[in-house]
Image (cartoon, coloured by chain):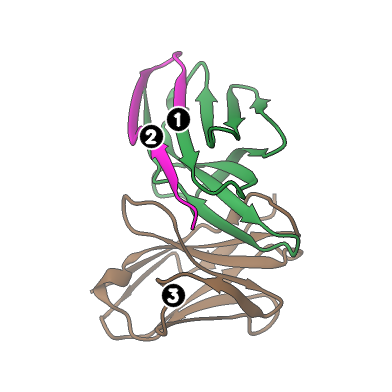
Chain colours: A green, B brown
Amino acid sequence: GENVEQHPSTLSVQEGDSAVIKCTYSDSASNYFPWYKQELGKRPQLIIDIRSNVGEKKDQRIAVTLNKTAKHFSLHITETQPEDSAVYFCAAHQGDSGGYQKVTFGIGTKLQVIP
Amino acid sequence: EPEVTQTPSHQVTQMGQEVILRCVPISNHLYFYWYRQILGQKVEFLVSFYNNEISEKSEIFDDQFSVERPDGSNFTLKIRSTKLEDSAMYFCASIERQGNYGYTFGSGTRLTVV
């Protein structure tokens, strides 16, 4: 089955600096890669995603890159703010034409932005 | 923005008791999932449900677990005889249609087995 590895497990940055979180996956059939942000005690929320036919996607201060050959994808947060502090999960989907998605999550990265 | 709602938000139960966790997915969503998250750990897949039947289940989803959609709106997870290790946050999630899309997660039910 799919194996998703995520690192680092914890990350502290100064406010205004950039943060990068990396994930690798093992199954070349994975074709969709969302990132979720989970604030303490709350539900995971989708913040950005990328499909396997795209190399990079950006939404304001966050961006995701995908290297299919190397089977890794990364989340980039620029100009970090204290409200970016949360746990971030990556995931890899192996979908089929019938709509069923098999999803594997990374272990999560706890990001702390220091004011 | 449409939400997936879950009840109760927190459930405390004695070991060996049955619990039912309830979820109301977004009305036009077709695919439903249960995940759990043990405190401080990653989100783990339990089961997926489409067209009134289980599509896939993980090794965690043993005979103690069951799901159903009794009335076309609620989506329930039942644990027949709870164990201490079932203590976790349980999230329901749904997606609208075929293809790969990110989940809309519910607010979660924190289950504490004592």
- The answer to whether mark 2 and mark 1 are in CB contact below 8 A is yes
* Type of amino acid under label 1: Ile
Quadrant where the C terminus of chain A lies? Answer: top left
Residue under the point 64% across and 80% down? B53
Q: Position of residue A38 (x, y in %)?
A: 46, 43
* Residue A114 in sight: no
- Judged left or right of residue B77, residue A102 is right
Q: Which mark is residue A71?
A: none
Q: What stretch is highlighted in magenta?
A: A1-21
The residue beneath circle 2 is: A7
Residue B66: say if magenta.
Answer: no
Please name the residue that numbered disc 1 is placed on: A21
User: Which numbered tag is attached to residue B61?
Assistant: 3
Mark 3 residue crowding within 10 angstroms, few (<14) / some (14–19) / many (20+): some
Q: How far apart are marks 3 and 2 (CA)?
A: 28 Å
The image shows residue A30, relative to residue A77, as above or below, that is: below
x, y (%) of residue A41? Answer: 40, 49
